[in-house]
């Protein structure tokens, strides 16, 4: 069956969005739609321009016989500012305050639309890096890892604080939680991670950086390397942080339990990258 | 700025895919693209036909002044059969066998592409039901809950087996794990669930159904109701199951540790629904 341009545009948009950072050959599309490669090329120009104008992302063209096209998730700076400001307002709600100065964030980490945007924004910031896998620690890091993995089209793996029989053989390390200085254990299934893998570490929250530093140490047990670190919220921390090269969307600057006031600002997201659409 | 049809088709496809089951008014699209409603209506016919032909889903039109259009995620029966057969092959790999007859599934639950398809297929099966929220239990259920929530455009909540300070006040219940007959505890943050909510319970694995039955009991503490139950894998179970009305994608029929053989077949997915595209 031959497809018309209008039908091709709808289906190609869907296909590309569902295969981020994957090289799709013109031959694939040409056969899928029984259409000439020249028509496919014209379609891709329309899609690329619309993606860029609408802040959906961009298309990278790889020339040559083994070439094709890749959808790269990207955001516009203005829409990133709008989204991060909206997150700041949500997080600064004093109703989030829990005993001990903790913040209730479970609703945000279970909101499919917000998570999708968080994943898109983190993916946009690291989309040019060579990343094989996303790593996080259970439980609250999982939604962040899953959405970033979705937008970067790579697998994600979960470090656990317990040892479950369903994980098979594991590698465990002890680490010191940065702010509470308690000794803790984390473990990762041996099969989860290949030697030499390039790993993006993500988490929902970072204070002293002890948990993330633990994951960095765990990676070296697998001879894997850190391709980057990204967190949803970083918290102001007076002492020296264990982690220094990271991306944060939000920065928690002050929590005043008595006055019931939470102060947040955008994280280092904008200073750590200049590469918007 | 006025959009051409080709640009509108690309952007509308992206918009609709990212807002499943949400009523979008023609006025919204008409203003977004500075285009007449009659043109938008023609666009939507092209999108609906392509979505249906390509197995992406369908568009429901709601007539009248408060009307508009809704993207409903749906799959084709043939592609569902293909996907579920592919999952069966993946799960039947004898390398998955762990001591005690457990199966290693962590790689599948961390594969962004597979999860996306799992979410789409479960969403397709329940897309006509009235569902406010998805519920699961930590840790392995989370990726399933998140992807189903993404495709149904509702939040998801996580029942925990521990009590964390960051959850605020919780409601806890004791339940008997069906196959091991052990008494266990599960808890849910009080703020997570509104009274009267209609809840789709999902999990990665079900044997006797004790954990899922625990979640059903927990729901009644919140005066919430069960809108459905869906699992990735159900396991053959000789005794009476605690849960009877559920959807499963895969059925584990036999695990022979000595012979290193895993037998799987499609779950009740096809018998429990007839409503494909």
Image (cartoon, coloured by chain):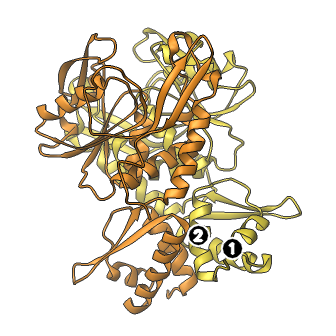
Chain colours: A yellow, B orange
**Residue A275 falls left or right of residue B84:** right
Q: Nearer the viewer, residue B128 or B256?
A: B256
Label 2 close to label 1 by CB (< 8 Å): yes
- Front in this rendered view, residue B91 or A188: B91
Residue A201 in sight here = no
In the displayed structure, B68 sits above or below A234; it is below
Inspect this view and state whether residue B167 appears. Answer: yes
Instruction: Please tell me in which quadrant of the rendered image residue B157 appears.
Output: top left
Q: Answer few, some or many: residues within 10 Å of disc 2's Cα (few below 14, many 20 plus, some between 14 and 19).
A: many
- Which of the 4 image quadrants contains residue B238? top left
Query: Residue B220: x, y in percent?
Result: 13, 34
Q: Quadrant of residue A171?
A: top right
Q: Which residue is mark 1?
A: A33
Which chain is indicated by disc 1?
A
The label shown at residue A130 is: none
For this view, does A59 lie left or right of residue B277? right
Q: Position of residue A94 (x, y in %)?
A: 21, 40
Residue at the spot of label 2 = A11
Label 2: element kind? helix
Residue name at image x 44 percent, y 90 percent: B39
x and y percentages locating residue A72 in the rendered image: 65, 57
Q: CA distance from mark 2 to mark 1?
A: 10 Å
Which residue, as the protein is rendered here, is positioned at the far right? Answer: A65
Question: SS at mark 1?
Answer: loop
Q: Chain of mark 2?
A: A
Image quarter where the C terminus of chain A lies is: bottom right
Q: Is residue A164 left or right of residue B272?
A: right
Mark 1 residue crowding within 10 angstroms, few (<14) / some (14–19) / many (20+): some
Say which residue appears at 45% left-offset and 87% top-offset: B42
**Residue B200: x percent and y percent?**
28, 43
Q: Which of pointers 2 and 1 indicates the residue nearer the eye?
A: 1
Image quadrant containing the N terminus of chain A: bottom right
């Amino acid at each position: 069956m031959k497809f018309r341009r209008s039908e091709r545009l709808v289906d190609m948009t869907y296909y590309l969005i569902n295969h981020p950072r994957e090289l799709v050959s013109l031959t694939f599309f040409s056969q899928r739609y029984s259409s000439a490669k020249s028509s496919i090329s014209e379609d891709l120009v329309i899609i690329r321009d619309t993606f860029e104008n609408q802040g959906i992302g961009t298309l990278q063209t790889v020339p040559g016989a083994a070439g094709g096209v890749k959808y790269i998730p990207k955001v516009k700076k203005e829409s990133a500012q709008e989204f991060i400001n909206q997150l700041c307002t949500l997080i600064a709600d004093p109703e989030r305050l829990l005993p001990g100065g903790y913040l209730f964030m479970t609703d945000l980490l279970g909101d499919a639309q917000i998570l999708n945007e968080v994943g898109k924004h983190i993916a946009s910031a690291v989309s040019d890096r060579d990343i094989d896998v996303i790593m996080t620690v259970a439980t609250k890091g999982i939604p962040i890892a899953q959405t970033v993995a979705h937008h970067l089209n790579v697998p994600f793996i979960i470090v656990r604080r317990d040892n479950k029989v369903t994980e098979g053989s594991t590698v465990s390390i002890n680490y010191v939680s940065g702010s509470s200085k308690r000794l803790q254990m984390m473990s990762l299934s041996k099969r989860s991670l290949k030697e030499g893998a390039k790993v993006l570490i993500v988490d929902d929250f970072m204070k002293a950086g002890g948990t993330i530093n633990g994951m960095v140490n765990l990676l070296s047990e697998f001879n894997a390397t850190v391709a980057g670190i990204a967190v949803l919220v970083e918290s102001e921390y007076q002492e020296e942080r264990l982690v220094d090269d990271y991306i944060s969307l939000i920065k928690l600057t002050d929590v005043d339990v008595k006055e019931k006031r939470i102060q947040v600002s955008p994280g280092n997201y904008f200073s750590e990258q200049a590469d918007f659409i």
